[in-house]
Image (tube, rainbow, N blue to C red):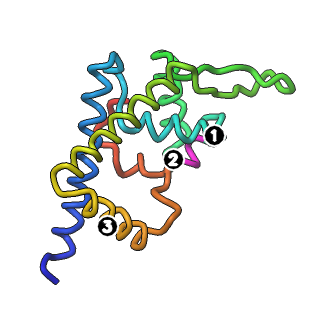
């Protein structure tokens, strides 16, 4: 083994952080200066069916209160809306707005550009091999949307 487990973990985290930082700054340049990485996880979970604070909390592995705060912030910033359930007016459903979808799409384009830059730097075969190796190691399910619990670096939502 040419490198220790902790070194490899830090390199993987560094790669993630490099991509996230590029997406965050790129989104800010496009007028989305108010988004954080945890917002992406929340919006993706909402698109996947987490339409309440309770469900968002379960899917992102945060408390219901933290999920409710995230929803409130996302609503204030125009990324989601809440609407009453037609069958139970006490229940609110959360929906991603066109602005939220546009921000997610812009972030995806930025991350695709980071991948292209990495391919230019180390070669497309190397990036393809890295992706294939990571899929073999972590599985085809990808990363859980429950990552905000350990990704969060501050109390800023």
Q: Which residue is farthest left?
A: 2
Tag 1, which secondary structure? loop
Q: Left or right: where does residue 129 sit relative to residue 42?
A: left
| Spatial CA span between label 1 and label 2 | 9 Å
Q: Which numbered mark, 1 or 3, is in the foreground of this view?
A: 3
Residue count near mark 2 (Cα–Cα under 10 Å), binned few <14, some 14–19, many ≥20: many
Vertically, is 130 above or below 80? below
Q: CA distance from mark 1 to mark 3?
A: 34 Å
Secondary structure at badge 2 equals helix
Span of residues in magenta: 56-60
Q: Position of residue 7 (x, y in %)?
A: 16, 68
Which residue does the image show at 49% across and 29% down from the upper left? 69
Q: How many marks?
A: 3
Report crowding for label 3: few under 14, some 14 to 19, many 20 or more residues within 10 A (C-alpha).
few
The residue tagged 1 is 50
Q: Main secondary structure of the magenta part?
A: helix
Decide if residue 3 is on the left or right side of residue 126: left
The vertical placement of 74 against 108, above or below, is: above
Q: Quarter holding the C terminus?
A: top left
Q: Quadrant of residue 64?
A: top right
**For marks 2 and 3 on the same chain, the one whose residue lies earlier in the sequence:** 2
The image shows residue 44 at horizontal and vertical percentages of: 53, 39
**Residue at the disc numbered 2:** 60
Q: Position of residue 10 (x, y in %)?
A: 20, 61
Q: Is residue 143 above or below residue 47?
A: below
Q: Closer to the N terminus: mark 1 or mark 3?
A: 1
Whole-percent x, y for residue 16 in the image = 28, 51
Q: Tell me whether the residue at label 1 lies in contact with that at label 2, contact meaning CB atoms closer than 8 angstroms.
A: yes
Query: Which circle's residue, 1 or 2, is located before the other in the chain?
Result: 1
Residue designated by label 3: 129
């Amino acid at each position: 083994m040419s490198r220790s487990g902790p070194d490899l973990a830090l390199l993987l985290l560094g790669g993630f952080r490099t991509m996230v930082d590029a997406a965050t700054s790129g989104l800010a340049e496009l007028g989305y200066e108010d988004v954080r990485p945890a917002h992406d996880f929340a919006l993706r979970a909402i698109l996947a069916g987490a339409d309440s604070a309770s469900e968002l909390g379960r899917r992102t592995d945060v408390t219901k209160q933290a999920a409710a705060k995230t929803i409130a912030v996302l609503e204030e910033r125009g990324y989601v809306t809440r609407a009453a359930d037609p069958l139970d007016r006490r229940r609110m459903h959360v929906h991603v707005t066109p602005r939220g979808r546009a921000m997610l799409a812009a972030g995806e384009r930025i991350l695709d550009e980071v991948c292209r830059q990495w391919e230019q730097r180390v070669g497309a075969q190397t990036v393809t091999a890295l992706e294939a190796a990571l899929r073999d190691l972590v599985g085809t399910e990808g990363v859980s949307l429950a990552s905000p619990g350990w990704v969060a670096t501050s109390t800023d939502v």
